[in-house]
């Protein structure tokens, strides 16, 4: 009887071990986290090239920025005033490569009519988030457009002394505005401004629309981007905090270093990210 019990216990332990070994790893998709590329990462190339590189990385989301040459035989640059035929060709190329244009920015129209055109462009292109740094006098008008079009505006934080460099200044600006307006949290710029990215994320809980996600080397305001997990932004801490908040949204990779050949660093960063996500509880 004793030997039978020992055998059964051993078999149970083996079953548990095998179950743990074969259990699927938690992924960003499980957490409803979208991982994509801010096209400025590939600013030395055309937008079509950026789409290709995004897909080669195994990703399906891209954030366009104004001024990037289009490529693919198309004239001009990425611009919310582009004609309808150019828009159709861009959407066709994106669909062929299984990449969604999910956000556009950083873009700040000078006039209210410019904001009208920008929102109409976003609706036409299926863009869910406009990344911007609206002038304070424009905020109420932008807020109304957000509700009208059901499109988010994610306010970006360039380093100080820009208007929204601190979560405190952003939260003040959000008072009385549409819930469609929130933060595009550029975690590297927070660190360059001397702020703790994890603490900034805590302050903005419930207001984070997307992130310009990165890690940076030591060096203050001029610190360069580096492979995630090797810098001073505390990537694991940020992911843990976003998981605690039940954040659901876009991690837009903005890797500005070595722009002509940064795919290897981005690949390493994604490996680190995936390993860290698998360990979140």
Image: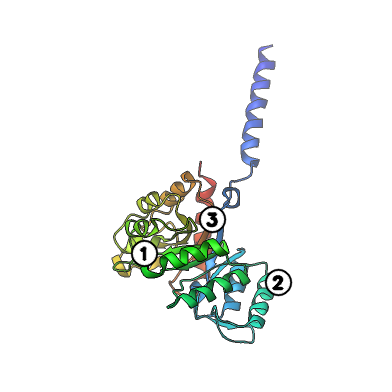
Q: Quadrant of residue 232?
A: bottom left
User: Secondary structure beneath disc 2?
Assistant: helix
Q: Is residue 41 above or below residue 276?
A: below
Which residue, given by chain and number where applicable, does mark 1 sit on? 189
Q: Dot 1, crowdedness within 10 Å: few (<14), some or many (≥20)?
A: many
Q: Nearer the viewer, residue 268 or 7?
A: 268
Q: Is residue 135 in view from this perspective?
A: no
Residue at x 67%, y 79% (from the top left corner):
89
Q: Which residue is mark 3?
A: 249
Q: Which one is earlier in the sequence, the residue at label 2 or at label 1?
A: 2
**Visible residue check, residue 14:** yes
**Residue 132 in picture, x, y percent from top left:** 44, 69
Q: Give the mark, 2 or 3, whose residue is nearer the N terminus.
A: 2
Q: Return the residue nearer the eye: 171 or 144.
A: 144
Judge whether 201 appears above or below 11 on screen. Answer: below
Look at the picture and state if 119 lies above or below 32: below
Q: Tell me the colour scheme of the image.
A: rainbow
Where is residue 185 shown, x and y percent of the image?
Answer: 42, 60
Task: Report the residue at 52% width, 63% height from top.
Answer: 146
Residue 96 numbered tag: 2
Distance in Å between CA atoms under marks 2 and 1: 34 Å
Please state if 36 lies on the left or on the right of 183 as rendered: right
Q: Secondary structure at mark 3?
A: loop
């Amino acid at each position: 009887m004793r030997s039978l019990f020992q055998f059964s216990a051993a078999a149970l332990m083996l079953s548990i071990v095998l179950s743990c070994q074969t259990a699927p790893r938690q992924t960003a998709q499980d957490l409803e986290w979208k991982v994509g590329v801010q096209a400025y990462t590939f600013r030395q190339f055309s937008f079509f090239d950026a789409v290709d590189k995004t897909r080669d990385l195994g990703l399906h989301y891209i954030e366009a920025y104004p001024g990037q040459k289009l490529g693919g035989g198309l004239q001009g640059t990425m611009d919310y005033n582009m004609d309808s035929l150019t828009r159709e060709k861009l959407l066709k190329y994106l669909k062929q490569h299984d990449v969604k244009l999910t956000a556009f920015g950083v873009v700040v129209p000078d006039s209210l009519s410019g904001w009208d055109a920008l929102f109409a462009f976003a609706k036409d292109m299926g863009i869910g988030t406009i990344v911007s740094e609206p002038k304070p006098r424009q905020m109420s008008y932008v807020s109304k457009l957000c509700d009208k079009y059901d499109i988010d505006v994610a306010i970006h934080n360039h380093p100080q002394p820009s208007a929204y460099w601190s979560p405190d200044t952003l939260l003040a600006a959000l008072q009385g505005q549409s819930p469609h307006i929130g933060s595009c949290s550029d975690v590297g710029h927070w660190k360059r401004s001397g702020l703790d990215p994890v603490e900034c994320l805590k302050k903005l809980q419930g207001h984070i629309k997307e992130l310009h996600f990165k890690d940076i080397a030591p060096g203050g305001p001029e610190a360069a981007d580096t492979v995630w997990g090797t810098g001073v932004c505390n990537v694991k801490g940020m992911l843990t905090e976003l998981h605690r908040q039940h954040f659901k949204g876009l991690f837009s990779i903005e890797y500005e270093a070595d722009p002509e050949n940064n795919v290897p660093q981005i690949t390493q960063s994604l490996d680190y990210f995936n390993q860290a996500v698998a360990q979140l509880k």
